[in-house]
Each structure stands twice: as C-alpha cells, then as structure tokens.
Image (cartoon, rainbow, N blue to C red):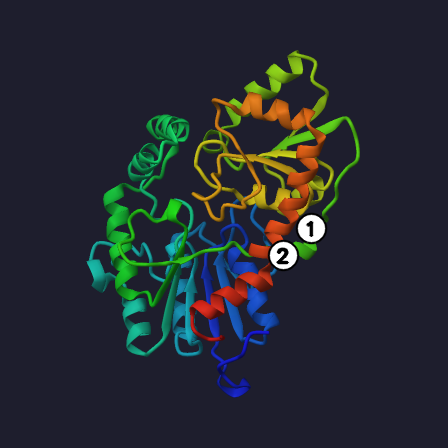
Amino acid sequence: MSEEKYNENKRPKFFVGIVETAGITLELSRGLREKGYDVKNIVQRPTSVIIPLEGHDKYIDKSQMARYWRDIFRIFLSNFNKYDYFVFNSCVTFFQGFPLLKNLGYIGHPDLILLRAMGKKIIIFATGTDLRSYPLLVEDLCEKNYKSHAKYLKMDLESGGGSLESDLQKTVKAKMIEKFAHEIFSQPVNAQRLTRNFHYLWVPMGLAKMKFRINDRDHLVLAHAPSKRQIKGTQHVLEAVERLSSEGVNFEFRLFENMPNDVLRRELSDTDIIIDQLLLPGIGTIGLEGMATGNVILSSAIPGYNGPDELPVVTSTPDDLYVKLKKVLKVKEMRLDLMKRGLKFVNKYHATDVVVNDFLKKLNLID
C-alpha cells in the first residue's frame, strides 16, 4: 500500500476540468475521491453521444459563447482559491481561447498567472491532437521503418484528416504549457511539440463497469466502432470485411456508430474481435475497452512504440489488415491467448486505482 505523505487535515484538494476526453476527467476524479481527496470536476457539455454525460459535478454549455465565458469567469472566481491542484485535460484551461486574450502571448493567460502566483499546482494533460505534429510523427515513423503506418498517416493528413490547428499554433501552445505547468502528462505519439520531459499518461478505466467474457462459439462476431470514419480508417476496414465475406469466411460484422458509451460497452461483451483505429499508431479507447470485455484487438498500435512491449494487439495497417484478420478468424489458440493477455494488460496499466496511484506518485504526494 502506498504511504500517504499528507495527513487528513492537510491533504490537497483537486480541481479537474475543463473538458472530457476518453472518460479521463471523470475516472481520475472518481479515483481521487475513492482515496479520500476532495475533488471538483467541471467540464464543457459534450456534444457527442459517445462521451459520458453523467457523473461530472457541473456541465458548461458552449452553444452560446457569451454565456459560456460568463460561466467560466464565475467558475474561476469561485474556485481558484479553494483548490491546491488544478488539472487541465486536453490542454484546455479556464481562459483558453478567450477572444480578447488569445493573441497576447503569455499575458493572455491571467488564470494561470494568478494560480502560479498563489502557489497553486498546475497539471496539464496533453491528449489527442493537442500538441501532436503530424509531419514530425510521419518523419519518426519513417526513421523507425514503420513505413506502412507513415504512408497512410500522410495520406490521411493530406486529405484533411489531421488537426485543425497548425504546427505553429501547437508550438505556441506548447510553450505556454511548459511555462506554466508544474507537471505535464502525455504520450510520445501526442507530444512532438513539447521540449521538456513529461510523464506517461495512462488512460484510467472503470473496469468494474465492463464485463469480460470469452464467447465459446465458432460463428465469431467482428466489430468496428469509429468515432470518425476517416480518422479511424473505416473505409479500409469495410474493404477487408467485404473481401473475407466474399470468400465465404464464417463471421458476423457489426458496425457501431454514434452509440452511447455505456451501451457500446455492453455490446462489446458480445463480440470477439475488434478492429480499432488503423491510421494513427496507437491504441484507441475502443481498443482498451475491447480488451476489458474479452476481445482480440487489431490496431495500428505498435508494441514498444505505443507503450509497453507486452501490448497485446495484432498490429495492422490497411496494407495487411486482410491477412491479419483472416488469421485471427481462423486460429482459435491465438485468439484465446490474446483475449486473456488483454484483460491482464488493462488491469495492470489502466485500472483507475492503478492510474491514480501512478498520478499521485508523479506529483510526489505518495511514495
């Protein structure tokens, strides 16, 4: 058991927000509360049904920007002096993007300036495209001889599938984060614009909400659940599925789209194989949830490049998806091995309690 460095009366308080990504804000808050920490989380109201819309303390509506900024200022003024640690998910701080401040450089972040001046600790999570440089990522993939990954990522980028922000904008954002943040959490595939060291960001998962089940059957169920088809490589998935189906390979294919996350998790317990994202090298949320529910995962993720060498995925790109998927469908021993290893992996690295302990250790709050 980790040793607490603070007694009950001096235990620090956490504010977590302002956006939700992959359930990180919600699960981090829940895990901290279970360890006895005082936590408040406030997030922008999600506009997609795939993002949980329950469990947070408060939602801020962005449909009317004047009202949104009014609410943000009120939230900041009523909370900046109540909490010791401010955790900002996806690099979104209180006044990030405020029209009158966004072109003022460092002084355009009075919230962070004040928090630092008051001795508050600022923690930044850089996720997704926040600080990712697609050109630098493609270059790195080429240097490491992951040429198929690089080819399709470059094609996707050139066809408009990359970030809406330019590399210059991300460089400016990274400098701001490095100036104000006490600690930064990210993953190498997302952090090309950072110049200082950061901690690895493990996505916390409420595994108790998911049912692990190995379905003993010959007619296998294959699924794909893209948040955005172009980014996840859905066209290539459909092509491989159609080719295998035309050859008479025995399986059922399910395409899950625009499905609430709690419903999707239940569906995953009745599938056997998940095709995760195929373009960006990395394991997606659906891939991790698939492991937790008893699925084999085919993904662009590369063991050793995207996390530990023991990452239990069948690394696939559009070039070899058909071949890899056909093998997984035919070799039962391979499937069972990957299913069991998948559950061990998420329990070892992604269980909320494990992730929160790692987070607190990185903040030097526990030993």
Q: Position of residue 11 (x, y in %)?
A: 50, 81
What residue do we see at 58% from left, 60% from top? 352
Secondary structure beneath label 1: loop
- Residue 263's image quarter? top right
Residue at (25%, 63%) from the top-left corner? 179
Residue 350 shows up from this direction: no
Along the line of sight, which residue is nearer the eye, 238 or 78?
238
Q: How many marks?
A: 2
State left or right for residue 209 relative to residue 142: right
Where is residue 367 drawn, in percent x and y?
A: 49, 75
Q: Pointers 2 and 1 in contact (CB under 8 A)?
A: yes
Q: Secondary structure at mark 2?
A: loop
Report the disc number at residue 1.
Answer: none
Q: Is residue 224 above or below residue 65?
A: above
Q: CA distance from mark 2 to mark 1?
A: 8 Å
Tell me: 37 left or right of 155: right
Q: Quadrant of residue 93?
A: bottom left
Q: Amino acid at mark 1?
A: Met
Does residue 2 appear in the picture of this structure?
yes
315 vs 126: above or below: above
Q: Examine the image and state in which quarter residue 133 appears.
A: top left
Q: Position of residue 311 (x, y in %)?
A: 54, 44
Within-10-Å neighbours for mark 1: few <14, some 14–19, many 20+: some
Q: Residues within 10 Å of mark 2 (few under 14, many from 20)?
A: some
Name the residue rendered at 58%, 66% in the picture: 31
Residue 3, horizontal then vertical, whole percent: 54, 78
Residue at label 1?
210
Please state which amino acid type lies under the numbered disc 2: Gly
In the displayed structure image, the side of residue 340 where residue 58 appears, left or right: left
Which residue in the protein does label 2 denote?
A: 206
Between 17 and 59, the one nearer to me in the picture: 17
| Residue occupying image coordinates x 35% and y 29% | 154
